Amino acid sequence: MVKIGVLALQGAVREHVKLLQAPGVEVVVVKKVEQLEELDGLVLPGGESTTMRRLIDKYDFFEPLKQFAKSEKPVFGTCAGLILMAKQLIGQSEGHLEIIDMEVERNAFGRQRESFEAELMVKGIADDIMAVFIRAPLIKSVGEDVEILSKYNGEIVAVRQDQFLACSFHPELTEDARFHQYFVEIVKETKNKCLNV
Ligand code: GLN
């Protein structure tokens, strides 16, 4: 059994909870810092990253979240969650949690394309993932330890760095659980590795 939390300060929480549910997975809605201790993995949902950061600070989640990632527990961020995980944000002097070595541009698709859907090839998952983009960020560059999982029109939209996963679209807004299953596998593998050390 693995326990996976969804940070529930703001954003699309319920949708993630639904898609994470699977045999062998207990899903926890995380509202208090103490809950992080019991988790094997964490999802940072989509929403609005500036608001989410403000709430992270207000409820003293900032250091505990950084520690969670430092302790090598898996983290999966979608859209605003991806923004929180970026090491660098274009136009800002520093990132937020700085978990993945990538440079990210917020709201990168411009006005005309504020939200749209596209079918994507995602390495290791499938070649027919329906991706919902909503005022989505783009990954402009990645460090050498980061694996690119998917591109849309030549731009990077999903990445993995070890046990950290991020995408600029919203797999939680579809009925397709394959992206979440991929994260659940990362959580299981990481937990087994820790138990075997
Ligand atoms: N544009 C939002 C931000 O900057 C992210 C949008 C989303 O999560 N759908 O935080």
Image (spheres, rainbow, N blue to C red):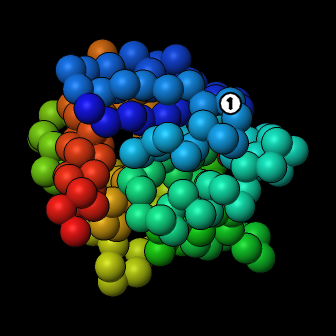
Rendered residue at 30%/27% (across/down) = 25
- Residue 188's spot in the image, x, y percent? 23, 45
Q: Could you tell me residue 20's position as x and y percent?
A: 34, 26
Q: Is residue 56 above or below residue 83?
A: above
Which quarter of the figure is the N terminus placed in?
top left
| Residue 4 % position (x, y) | 41, 35
Q: For disc 1, does the CB lie below 8 Å from ligand 1? A: no
Q: Nearer the viewer, residue 162 or 109?
A: 162
Amino acid, disc 1 = Lys
Q: Residue furthest bottom?
A: 144
Q: Quadrant of ligand 1?
A: top right
Q: What residue do we see at 39% from left, 16% from top?
A: 18
Which of the 4 image quarters holds residue 93?
bottom right
Residue 191, position as x, y percentages in the image: 27, 52
Quarter holding residue 11: top right
Assign a secondary structure to mark 1: loop
Q: Nearer the viewer, residue 23 or 172?
A: 23
**Circle 1 is placed at which residue position?**
31
* Residue 94 in view (yes/no): yes
- Residue at 41 percent of width and 56 percent of height: 73
Question: Which residue shows up at 23% across the image and 26% down it?
Answer: 24
User: Toward which corner of the image does residue 197 lie, by quadrant?
Assistant: bottom left
Lateral position of residue 24 relative to residue 76, left or right: left
Residue 177 to residue 54: above or below: above
* Residue 140 visible to the viewer: no
The image shows a total of numbered marks equal to: 1
Work out whether residue 152 or residue 36 is closer to the camera in this orientation and state it. 36
Residue furthest to the right: 58
Structural crowding at the residue carrying mark 1, measured as other residues with C-alpha within 10 Å and reported as few (<14), some (14–19) or many (≥20): some
